[in-house]
């Protein structure tokens, strides 16, 4: 029994270290883009599916100069170039503009456009719910559906 606990503890520590390395890689890539100008970011968590984050380097008019993406389920996901959007207005991006077989990447692109439009309009940009908040929200929906039945 003690060996099982040790294995889980090692796996937990390894996951934390590797996730930290992934976050450092993402942060370094963000800083590189940010040094070149403004950056619009969109994100879509994946749960058991590949999550996605997109970053678009934009000029003062919201025109995309470069794109980067990170998508994946594990700590192995890395930031990669995301070409094909140069010269487009970031606020006009929609889910249909993204790759057909990457649903969360398309949603992250739409989130980047929405976030940029809110920023330009002076609206507050809410933080996404934490994993605990998402679990709590799902539990509330489940309980309400049970009461209604």
Image (spheres, rainbow, N blue to C red):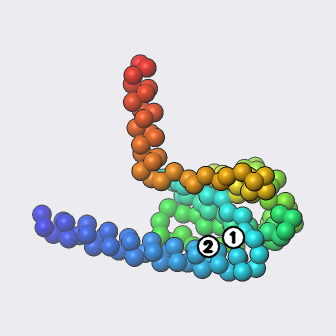
50 relative position to 86: left or right: left
Q: Which residue is mark 1?
A: 68
Residue under the image location 19 percent in, 66 percent down: 5
Residue under the image location 78 percent in, 52 percent down: 121
Q: Earlier in the sequence, mark 1 or mark 2?
A: 1
Q: How many marks?
A: 2
SS under mark 2: loop
The front one of 133 and 121 is: 121
Give the label on residue 79, or none: 2
As drawn, which residue projects farthest toward the left?
1
Residue under the image location 40 percent in, 76 percent down: 17
Residue under the image location 72 percent in, 69 percent down: 39
| Contact? badges 1 and 2 (CB < 8 Å) | yes
Whole-number angstrom distance, CA of label 1 to CA of label 2: 6 Å
Quarter location, residue 147? top left
The front one of 56 and 119 is: 119
């Amino acid at each position: 029994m003690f060996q099982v606990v040790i294995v889980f503890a090692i796996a937990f520590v390894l996951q934390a270290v590797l996730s930290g390395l992934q976050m450092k890689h993402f942060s370094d890539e963000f800083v590189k883009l940010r040094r070149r100008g403004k950056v619009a970011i969109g994100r879509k968590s994946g749960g058991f599916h590949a999550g996605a984050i997109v970053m678009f380097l934009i000029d003062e008019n919201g025109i995309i100069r470069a794109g980067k993406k990170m998508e994946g389920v594990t700590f192995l996901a890395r930031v990669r170039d995301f070409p094909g959007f140069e010269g487009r207005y970031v606020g006009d991006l929609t889910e249909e503009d993204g790759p057909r077989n990457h649903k969360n990447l398309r949603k992250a692109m739409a989130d980047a456009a929405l976030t940029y439009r809110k920023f330009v309009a002076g609206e507050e940009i809410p933080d996404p719910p934490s994993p605990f908040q998402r679990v709590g929200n799902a539990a509330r929906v489940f309980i309400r559906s049970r009461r209604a039945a």
